[in-house]
Image (tube, rainbow, N blue to C red):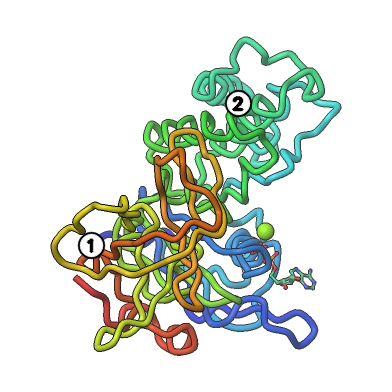
Amino acid sequence: MTTPVVQLQGITREFSGSVAVDAIDLTVERGQFTALLGPSGCGKTTTLRMIAGFLPPSGGTILLDGKDATHLPPERRNIGMVFQSYALFPHLTVEKNVAFGLRMRGVPAAEIRTRVGEALELVGLAHLARRKPKELSGGQQQRVALARAVAIRPSVLLLDEPLSNLDARLRIQMRQELLRVQRETGLTTILVTHDQEEALELADSMVILDRGRIVQQGHPREVFRAPATRFVAQFLGYENFLDLPGRGRVTIRPEHIEILAPTQKPPAGGEVVDATVTAVRFRGTDFAVTVTVGDRTLQAVSTDEALRPGASIRLHLPLARAVPLPGDDADARLEPPDQQECPA
Ligand SMILES: Nc1ncnc2c1ncn2[C@@H]1O[C@H](COP(=O)(O)OP(=O)(O)O)[C@@H](O)[C@H]1O
Ligand SMILES: [Mg+2]
């Protein structure tokens, strides 16, 4: 077992009496791509800033490569960082921006030239080395920021919502770009994001934060298939929450709920309930359908062009597809995730 690159032990940060990060324990192994995922204000940036050394923790210990770095200044931690706002120097060319961290570290000029060349090659910007940031698109500027962070050969790369200033199409393209750079360099990476798709697509370890605490962590597929709590499930896009007699609280994905045609025989297993359509939204390949069942609102999916609000329908709820939510949100906040009962 090699030493983890980053270990947070009970890391806490308060701001004038209110707790932004609450006793976080986190281990990041070498070469791992970890995503810290959670809604705005849950403490993601504060956690990254403490790892980078920009913000002292109020309590707890930070180990970098196995050594206590809790009180080490940022320049003595070998960390590369990319921010949401690219934070490039506007008066410096692309290559000088990328060279900056190397100069600060006293790397010899010839070595700087080689490394800057390699880093720009890696992000596909070698041909724009003499441009100034304002002569580049947002996506290109973010690649420069990435090249600058990678050029110092950091032991860990910290990315704080690096794609959220880009438009939707570019953001999805850049995800793949990020993944390629991470795989080619093998850099240990921590990505902060509020975008669950980004975390699911990129990370090999996903850590979900709620109000300064870790509520679940694991491989993205594992967490997605077995969210521990309603908060996690909702954050990952689950919309239907039901309390089933004998089974407790469960969630069923909208695409698993079938709207039965008037004479259709329901599939075996599960339950059939009467429902009323309250809204139908066209989404391109299908319709998102909101229905009420008694006093409960559920989301379903349909390809039926004729479905209209007000229609009385029958729904098939495939209970075999129901995902149990074993942890109540209050409980989940009291126990570390590995002690929670997780369904197989
Ligand atoms: N410098 C600061 N001073 C006071 N409160 C802060 C400061 N930085 C962050 N906070 C508070 O800490 C909490 C977590 O913030 P942050 O880590 O930026 O969240 P996230 O990055 O997940 O959106 C928020 O309630 C925020 O208002
Ligand atoms: Mg933030």
Instruction: Name the amino acid, label 2.
Output: Ile
**In which quadrant will I find the C terminus?**
bottom left
Nearer-the-camera pick, 7 or 340: 340
Label 2 CB, ligand 2: below 8 Å? no
Residue 203 lies, in percent from the top left, at 40, 50
- Residue indicated by mark 2: 112
As drawn, the residue found furthest toward the left would be 268
**Where ligand 2 lies, by image quadrant?**
bottom right
Label located before the other in sequence (1 or 2): 1
Q: Quadrant of residue 17?
A: bottom right
Q: Quadrant of residue 227?
A: bottom left
As drawn, the residue found furthest toward the top would be 127
Instruction: Name the amino acid, label 1.
Output: Met
Tell me the distance, in whole angstroms, between the alpha carbons under discs 1 and 2. Answer: 34 Å
| Label annotation for residue 197 | none
At mark 2, the secondary structure is: helix
- Residue indicated by mark 1: 1
| Residue under the point 46% across and 41% down | 306
Residue 121 lies, in percent from the top left, at 52, 18
- Tell whether 260 sits left or right of 231: left
Nearer-the-camera pick, 288 or 153: 288
- Tell whether 217 sits left or right of 154: left
- Residue 253 showing in the rendered view: yes
| Residue under the point 61% across and 40% down | 163
**In which quadrant will I find the N terminus?**
bottom left
Nearer-the-camera pick, 55 or 236: 236
Please determine whether, in this image, residue 125 is positioned above or below residue 297. Answer: above
Q: Quadrant of residue 20?
A: bottom right
Q: Are marks 1 and 2 in contact (CB under 8 Å)?
A: no
